[in-house]
Image (cartoon, helix red, strand yellow):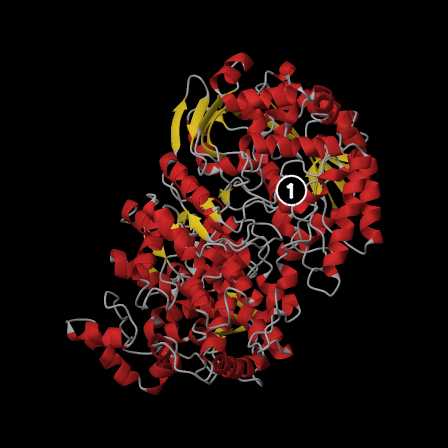
Amino acid sequence: MNPTPEAVAEALRRAGLRDVLVDGTNRAAYSTDASLYRLLPTAVVRPHDRDEVIAALAACRELSVPVTSRGAGTSIAGNSIGTGVVLDFSKHMNHLVSLEAEAGVAAVQPGIVHAALQKAALAAGWRYGPDPSSHTRCTIGGMIGNNACGSRALGYGKTSDNLLALESVLADGTVLRTARSTARADAVAASPLLGDLDRLVGSELALVRREFGRFGRQVSGYAMQQLLPENGFDVTGFLAGSEGTLAVATEAMVRLVKEPAQRLLVVLGYADIYDAGDAAAGLLPFAPVALEGMDRRIVDILTARRGPGAVPPLPRGDGWLFVELAGDDAGELGSIAERVVSQSGSIDSMIVPDTVVAAALWRVREDGAGLSGRSPRDRPAHAGWEDAAVPPQQLGPYLREFDALMTEHDLTGLPYGHFGDGCLHIRIDFPLAADGGTAVFGSFLEASAQLVAKYGGSLSGEHGDGRARSGLLHHMYSPEAIDLFGRVKRVFDPSGLLNPGVLVDPDAPTDHLRIPAAKTPREPLALLYPHDGGDFSQAVHRCTGVGKCRADNGGSHGVMCPSYLATGDEKDSTRGRARVLQEMLNGTSVRGWDAPEVHDALDLCLSCKGCLSDCPTGIDMASYKSEVLHQTYKGKRRPLSHYTLGRLPQWVRLSRKTSRLASKLVAVGSRPAAAKRLAGVDPRRSVPEFAPQTFRAWCAKNGVAAFDPSDDRPNRVVLLVDTFTNYFTPATGRAAVRVLRDAGFEPVVVERDGCCGLTLISTGQLDAAKKTLGKSIADLDPVAAQGLPIIGLEPSCTAVYRSDAAELIGSPESARVAGKVVTLAEFLATVPGWQPPDLTGRKVVAQPHCHHHAVMGWSPDAELLKRAGADVQRLSGCCGLAGNFGMEEGHYEVSVKVAERQLLPALAAQPDAVLLTDGFSCRTQADDLAGRSGVHLAELLDPGTD
C-alpha cells in the first residue's frame, strides 16, 4: 500500500526537510509540466541544499516512494512529473555559486534560471552558449537533464558540450563528483560504481560504437558514446540527458564562451520548407552559429493573431532559413554573408545588418513554441512528436515524408526548428479530446518513430524522451541497446527509485494522457469562450505549460504573472492555476467549482489579464476566475467584498451623498478600520474621496451635449463616462473634452448614466454583469451604427467593451460597439495633422494599466509621447492594486510586493517626474503607497486649465 501524502510529509520533515508541500492545491499544480501527461505527486519538496536532497532520498528509500527532479517544469516530454516526491530546485537551490571571469567558468545550483546565469556571464564579458527558447525561465538543471541545445547549438554546442563538472546524489545517498578533466583510470579508481560502469561499457564496445553518437542531435536514450575510451570515459557528459533517471544533480560547473563583437543575420527565401531543408546542410561549411528554419504556416498564424505588422518583411517564398554569422570583423562577416546568399540556392534573400530588425525576426522564431499551440486549422495543437532530428543531409526528404504522414492521419501543425542540426519542432492537432483520439495519437507516434528511424534519426533532438518517446525507443535502437539501458540504470539506481517510467521500463506514450481524462462541465457556462468553441475545458487546456508566466517579462514590457513574481510559488503562476483547473475537470483529486484547491489557486490572481496578451497560447485566467466565482456563488451567499467592492458603481449611483459621507468616515480613526473589515476591505487601504461635482454635471454646464441620433454635425465623438471618471476623477474627463475640442472635435455623451459591469465581472457576478453591460451596449449601439468613435478614458472599462463583451454577450451589437471603442491615444493617432503639445524635457514615469496593455496595447500611447518629445520611462508589470484585488483583506502584502517590483522603485528614483497613470487603480496605488499623484494622458495633453 502506498503511503499517504501526510505520512510522506511527516517522514520528510522528520528527516530535516524545511519546505514540504502536500496540500491539494500544490499537488495539483505539479501534476504536469509542459507535456501532455498527468501524474499526481504524493508530495513536493523544495530543497534548500545538497544535505536536504540526501535526506529526502533517504526518506523516500525507506518508504519506497519514487523521486523525480524538476527545474522550471518546462519539460515538453513529461520528464519532470511523477507519482512520488517531486524535487523542485527552482525555489531555493537557484544560486550562482561562483563565476571565474578569467577562466570563463561558472558554478551553479540546478535551479538557477538560464537568464540569471546569462545576465551574470554577460556582465563579466562572457555568455553561456546554449540558448533554448525558454531561456527566460528554464533552469540549468533542467537543461542538463534533457541535454538542451537551443538555436545556437551550431556555434556553442549542446548543454553536455558546456558541462565541465557535476555534483550529483545517487539514489543510495552517495555524492558523486565527476569532471571532464578526470582521467578514466582516476575516475574508475575513485568510485566502485564507475568501475562497474566502465566494465559494462567495455563489454559492449562494438554495440556502442555502432549505434550511438552517429550525429550531433542523437539525444534519445543514454549518451553511451560519451563513455567510450576514445572519448575519455566522460561520465559528466554522459549524465547530461539522462533525465533524472540515474542521479540527482546538485551543482554544476559550466563553460562560458566569449560574446562575439559582431552578429549578422542572413534570411533566405525558398519555394517551400522542403527546399529550405534540402539547402540547410550545404550552408554548414560557412560555420553559422545558428541555422533555423520555418515556413509560411507559422508566419500566417502570427500575422493573424497580432496583425500585419507583427512580422518584419521577409524574402519571397514560403519557406525560410535564418542564418546567423558571428565574429569580430564586420567586413569579414559581410563577405561571408554574400557567399552564403550566392551558394544558398534561395529564390530571394536579405542580409540584415540592423540589429533591431534582426531581433524582431528572431522573436518570431523564439515564440514559435507558444505560437504553434494552435494549428493552421485553429485547433489545439499538442506536443508529443515535437522534437525529432535526422542527420542534416536527410532533412529535406524527411520533411516531405513527414508532411505526407500528417496528411495521411488528417493532422496539421506549424513546423520550425534547428535545420542546421536536422532538428524539427512541431505541435500537432491530435484530436485528444475526441472519441478515438488517443488511438490516433498512438498510431501516429508509432508511424513517426518508424519514419525517423528510416532516416537514421533520433526521436528527440533536445527535449529528451520522457513519457512521450521512451516507449518508442525500440524503433530506433536494437534490443541489445535497449537492454544496455536497463543494465546502466541498475548500476546507478538498482531499486528504480529515480524517475521510473522514463527511458528504462517505460510507460506507453498513450498512458497518463491529461486531456482525454478531462470532463466537460455539466453546468451552463456564463461566458461564451468564442475562441474555444464554447468549451471551458479547451480554454483551460490552452495552457501548454511553456511557463512564460514564471519569467520576469519586464524586458519586453510584459505584465504576466505578477502574483508568481511576488511569491515564487508555482500555484500562483498562470500555469499553476491552469493545472489546478485541469485537475478540477479531471475530477479525481480536485472536485467541483467550489473545491478549496481551486479557490486557493485563484485567490492571488489579480485578474490583470496579462496572460491574455503575454502568454503565447492566449490563456485568459481573469475570465476563468470570473467563471469559477460565478459557478461557485450563483444563488449562494458571497464574500463581503463582492457586495461592497463588486457593486461599487451601484452603491455610488444609489446614494452619492451617503457614499460621500462614508468615504470621509472610513478615511480616519480606528472605528473606520473595523468598518472596512466589515466591508471586506483591508484597513490599511484608503478610500478615495468623491469629487464635489460629477463629470456629467460639469458636462451639462459646459456645452457637452447628450448624443442625438438626428444630430448630423461633423466631428462628433462620444466619450465613455465610466464610474471612476464621473464620480472620482472628473478632472480627467474635463481635460479630455478640452484636448478633443482643441483637436477639432466636439465630444458628446450618451444620455443614460451607464456602467460596463467591470467590478461585477471581476467578482464573478456574471448574470448581473451581463444585464448591466447589455444596457450600456444598447445605449452605445446607435453611436456605433453611425460610425462615431467611442473614446474610453478608464482603461479597464474600455477593455470590457473591447474584449469582455464578446465573452459575456457576444451579440452583433456588442461586436459593433467593440469595433468603435478606442483609447484617447488610438483616436488621436488617426487625426490628420494633429500634433501633441511640446513636452520636450518633461520626465514621465508611465505605468500602463494592465488591461490597457493586454487588450488595447500601449504602443499608440508610447508613440504619441515620443512625438511630443517627452522623456518616458515605461514601467512593466502590474501596479499591484488591480481593482478590487488590492483592496480586499488578505491581499495587501502581495499587492505591495507587486508594486515594489517596478512602480515604487521608479517613483523613488524620479521624485520630480510626472506619473502617468490612466488607470484609476494605478493612481490609487501610487497615492496609497508612495504619496504620489498620477495624471491621465488627457491631463498631460490638456491645453487649458480647470
Judging depth in this view, the residue of 205 and 380 nearest the camera is: 205
Q: Which residue is the site of mark 1?
A: 505
Let me know if residue 871 appears in the view. no
Judging depth in this view, the residue of 712 and 334 nearest the camera is: 334
Disc 1 element: loop
The picture quadrant where one finds residue 512 is bottom right
Q: Position of residue 941 (x, y in %)?
A: 41, 59
Above or below: residue 599 compared with residue 56:
below
Q: Position of residue 282 (x, y in %)?
A: 78, 26
Instruction: Report the number of discs.
Output: 1
Judging depth in this view, the residue of 743 and 724 nearest the camera is: 724
User: Disc 1 residue type?
Assistant: Asp
Q: Residue at 50% across / 15% down in the picture?
A: 189
The picture quadrant where one finds residue 332 is top right
The picture quadrant where one finds residue 24 is bottom left
Judging depth in this view, the residue of 218 and 736 nearest the camera is: 218
Q: Residues within 10 Å of mark 1 (few under 14, many from 20)?
A: some
Residue 811 relative to residue 137: left or right: right
Q: Quadrant of the C terminus?
A: bottom left
Residue positioned most to the front: 1
Let me know if residue 340 appears in the view. yes
Q: Position of residue 619 (x, y in %)?
A: 56, 60
Q: Position of residue 475 (x, y in %)?
A: 77, 39
Above or below: residue 724 compared with residue 651:
above
